[in-house]
Image (spheres, grey):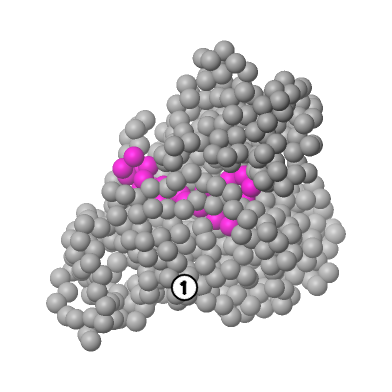
Amino acid sequence: MAHDLIIRGGAIADGTGNKTFSGDIAIKGNTIVEVGSVSGTAAREINADGALVTPGWVDIHTHYDAQATWDTALAPSSWHGVTTAVMGNCGVGFAPAAPDKHDWLIGLMEGVEDIPGAAMTEGLTWGWESFPEYLEALDRHAYAIDIAAQVPHGAVRGYVMGERGAKNEEASDADIARMAQIVEEGVRAGAVGFSTSRTFLHKATDGEYVPGTFAKEDELFGIGHALKRAGHGVFQMTSNHKDMDKEFGWMERMARDLGVTVTFNLVQTDEAPDLWKKMLGMLDRTNAENLPVYAQVAGRPAGILMGWECTVHPFIAFPSWAELAALSPADRRTRVADPQFRTRMINETPADMTGFGLFVTRSFEKMFVLEAGDGSAPDYEPAPEQSVAAIAHAQGVKPEQIIYDAMCANGGEGLLYFPLFNYTAGAMDPIHTMLQHPRTNIGLGDGGAHCGAICDASIPTFMLTHWVKGRTRGDRLPLEFIVKRQTRDTALLYGFSDRGLIKPGLKADLNIIDLDTLAIPAPHMAHDLPANGRRLVQEAHGYTATLKSGVVTFQNGEDTGARPGGLVRGPQHTAA
């Protein structure tokens, strides 16, 4: 046969941003060899008539660093058409790892990314100390998708400085030199970048901020020089969201003086609701100079989900919660269904809370019921009049009554939605603007992380269901633009020039999508991590097939068991 596979008659959005066209795609091995009207034959053909065909999604912000050691499917991202994922973000990960620091690294990841510590303790298959050895361990697995790793600041600092590093003491010149050496070694071995966290939201389980949170510029630039010497590598930074403008100066200088690509997280916060506009203005300046500084932006509000089994919910400070917390999920659902218990709990006075906990659990005007309970798709852009506060006022009842009943829906698995970022005015208009800036990239889905509070790994699918075809409270965005933004644009940020386009000579990573039926149901809690660990998951409907390197990995939502993916080491280039 001339080809291994031909996809016939699809509407091709090829990742360039150009207008969708009808055509065929021929694949030989793991490579696209022909696009257009293909007259040859193949061992297998897929009829894509009436379907949309896109490159596979390239997700640049995930946290599968632990999961990749025990799970080759890497769901839920793989369920949503992701064919390449970059992990090791936010300064947390598992290498380098001194033998006596395994529990500390797990506590760091658990505290920052809300991944159950017991699951990581049971599931992690330690067999490395250095970062190159960690890459070797990953390289021994085959996956449903490709993965790429970054060297995490927290692990490096703890490895070099011990307790001084863990407690964010200032690094000496010798410390910085050793950290830079480790980062350079990791990047030369195949890491695609380095990551750090400078946000006050990120703490280990022991209450300490992520190592590197307060690192001085000499430490940051010491590592920047390591990336320069290695010849590649993105410097990823999770910023303190209300002070992003104060960080921009050193990022700009790193890009200008060292030529290092820098990417930082950009969101709208209620504390500084217009700062994102100022940051886009700063990006306009660096864009004019063609400096490689980019913001990662989310495709929807960073939504904290709250339910009886979630990490946080509005009743967590109520006296009766102590009775519920010790129960199994099934017994808890039975208990909350008791009308007498309901009456008692909603009339209790919660313990005093301050700061972030008080804001999330008592800001009823920012709290919404995620779904109607009838199986319909969740509404991620609800209007202010749909808030718990508004509903309670309209019904003349306490907000706790609305909350309690919503969490008891669906057999006790109902969820509330609290859009933490990007929703100050109760609409996604800031996201609409941020997505269109030439120096932003779609990210922040956090696949593999925030298992009990956030389920945003579905954002690649949401970009189509909401921004292309479903938004009703504002302007939408063109299909071709959205496809380009999460394929070619995200691929090129990390130097993956061999993917992200439907073009001869490039990797055959593809999605075949029934756009009419594409949908995401509400998230739900699953207990499928090691040690029966819990995580929020969210499926997708409407992916006819996902192909990784020319092999069908998912068909009509079902895992085929094929594992053609693997570790991506450094930038991937093609002559095409």
The answer to which quarter of the image holds residue 533 is bottom right
Looking at the image, which is closer to me, 31 or 211? 31
Start-end of magenta stretch: 446-470
Looking at the image, which is closer to me, 274 or 76? 76
User: Which residue: 56% across, 77% down?
Assistant: 141
Q: Quick one: quadrant of the C terminus? A: bottom left
* Figure check: 435 above or below 132: above
User: Which residue: 65% across, 43% down?
Assistant: 310
* Figure check: 235 above or below 330: below
Please name the amino acid that badge 1 sits on: Gly
Question: Does residue 450 belong to the magenta stretch?
Answer: yes
Q: Is residue 20 left or right of residue 216?
A: left
Position in image of residue 90 (x %, y %): 63, 55
Among all residues in the image, which is located at the extreme bottom? 1
Position in image of residue 362 (x %, y %): 66, 26
Position in image of residue 340 (x %, y %): 71, 25
**Residue beneath label 1, please?**
561
* Figure check: 174 above or below 363: below
User: Which residue: 56% across, 28% down?
Assistant: 366
* Number of numbered tags placed on the structure image: 1
The answer to which quarter of the image holds residue 221 is bottom right
| Viewer can see residue 257 | no
Question: Does residue 564 belong to the magenta stretch?
Answer: no
Position in image of residue 124 (x %, y %): 69, 69
